[in-house]
Amino acid sequence: MHTAEVIPVIHNVSSVPKMLEYARIAIGYGFKTVAYSRVFGAAAQQGIGEVFKMSLRHNASIIILPDISDVMDLLRPDTALFISRPGKGSVRFSADLVKGRTIIVVNGSDLPFVEEEVRGRGLLVHVEDVDIGSLGQFVLLLNGLRNR
């Protein structure tokens, strides 16, 4: 896997521990760029500094943007995959879906994406057919990319 072509994006996160856990996982899998959009609450007040510290320790870059529309506009992905729960229009993830510069977007609040966040921007995907939560789907998807 060429991690330079794939950028994990954590969207809609307010929890400091969740913000750090997503960064730890993405950086641990070798991603040198991790993006966040719609960071609010304690994550905005305390988590951003902690995530930047982690990124500096691991020679990675962190991007913080206001919303998913800014991610699309500034990162200009060829492909956008939104990690979702099984069903509700999502397709099973396959590494073949990763084409060109790809963003993998996970909802940091463990809620489903709002239709307006995804419509016209990308594809809803899931890894497992059972609901294991956003973090579980995220880890399994990154592991699937690493093993392709």
Image: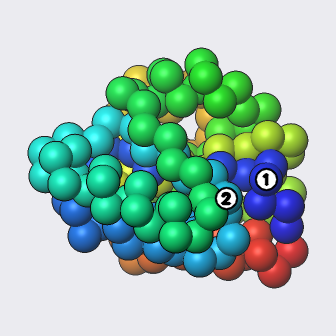
**How far across and how far down the image is residue 79, in percent?**
74, 38
**How far across and how far down the image is residue 121, in percent?**
60, 27
User: What secondary structure is found at the residue carrying circle 1?
Assistant: helix
Which quarter of the rendering shows the N terminus? Answer: bottom right
Would you say 58 lies left or right of 48 here?
right
Instruction: Say whether marks 2 and 1 touch (CB < 8 Å).
Output: yes
Query: Please, what is the three-letter code of the amino acid marked with disc 2?
Result: Lys
Q: How is the image coloured?
A: rainbow
Q: How crowded is mark 1: few (under 14 residues within 10 Å), some or many (20 or more)?
A: few
The residue located at (61%, 59%) in the rendering is 60
Would you say 128 lies left or right of 114 here?
right
**How far across and how far down the image is residue 111, in percent?**
29, 53
User: What secondary structure is found at the residue carrying circle 2?
Assistant: loop
**How far across and how far down the image is residue 50, in percent?**
31, 61
Q: Which of 5 and 90 is in front in this view?
A: 5
The residue located at (54%, 29%) in the rendering is 71
Q: Which mark is residue 32?
A: 2
Q: In this view, does 68 lie above or below 105?
A: above
Q: Which image quadrant for residue 46?
A: bottom left
The residue located at (51%, 61%) in the rendering is 55
Query: Please, what is the three-letter code of the amino acid marked with disc 1?
Result: Ala
Q: In this view, does 61 lie above or below 127?
A: above
Q: Nearer the viewer, residue 40 or 104?
A: 40
Residue 74 seen by the camera: yes
Q: Residues within 10 Å of mark 2 (few under 14, many from 20)?
A: some
Q: Which mark is residue 4?
A: 1
**Label 2, label 1: how many angstroms apart (C-alpha)?**
7 Å
